[in-house]
Image: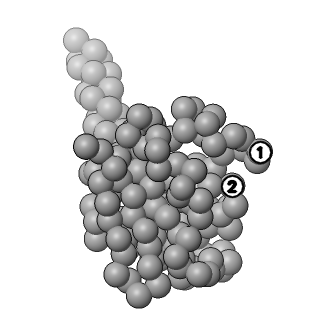
Amino acid sequence: MAKKQSCLEKRVEKLSSNKVSMSRGTLVVDENLRQLIQPLGALNIKVVSPPQGMSDEDIKSAILSHRIIVTKNAKDFIDDASIHEYGIIALEDLGFIDHTQDGTNTTARIVSKAIQKYSLWSKAHGFILILKPSGKHLFRNLTG
């Protein structure tokens, strides 16, 4: 009986730890921003990047559900954010993308701070956050 309880306790602990890690969320980095994968990872953010050449439609249906995409092409993703249940962080207005490959990367730090400031992990989907160099980012709900 003690062994069964021990196994059950381990399973519950594993499920609980998965829930904690899932609640933080996962960013999907668009293919033209691959230089942000390592810096975002260095800031303790889980990052997924679609395979090179994957269509936007396939990215939306196969990878984005309940995730947030970081992109310089927000217009390609806005219309389907509510349908496929994802959020968007748009970098078009930043004017620069830092190529530093560690946690000091300015672009990755702006993304990380904006995620915290706007509580994006808890919003899950149906929004766009347009990042601005001034720090005065624009948040908009895309759901009715």
> What x and y, as percent, mark residue 25?
40, 49
Quadrant assignment, res 22: top left
Please tell me the numbered disc located at residue 53. 1
**Residue 67 locus on image (x, y percent):** 44, 45
Residue at the spot 31% in from the left edge and 39% down from the top edge: 19
* Residue 137 visible in the shown view: yes
- Residue tagged 2: 31
Q: Give above or below for 82 relative to 111.
A: above
Q: Earlier in the sequence, mark 2 or mark 1?
A: 2
Tell me which residue sits at (77%, 45%) in the image. 53
User: How packed is label 1: few (under 14 Cα within 10 Å), some, or many (20 or more)?
Assistant: few
Q: Residue at x 53, y 58 (%)?
A: 74
Q: Is residue 73 above or below residue 137?
A: above
Residue drawn at 34 percent across, 50 percent down: 142
Q: Secondary structure at mark 1?
A: loop
Amino acid type, residue under disc 2 in the picture: Glu
User: Please, what is the three-letter code of the amino acid marked with disc 1?
Assistant: Gly
Which numbered marker is on residue 117?
A: none
The x and y percentages for residue 87 are: 41, 50
Do the residues bearing badges 2 and 1 touch, measured as CB atoms within 8 Å? yes
> Can residue 63 be seen at all in this image of the molecule?
no
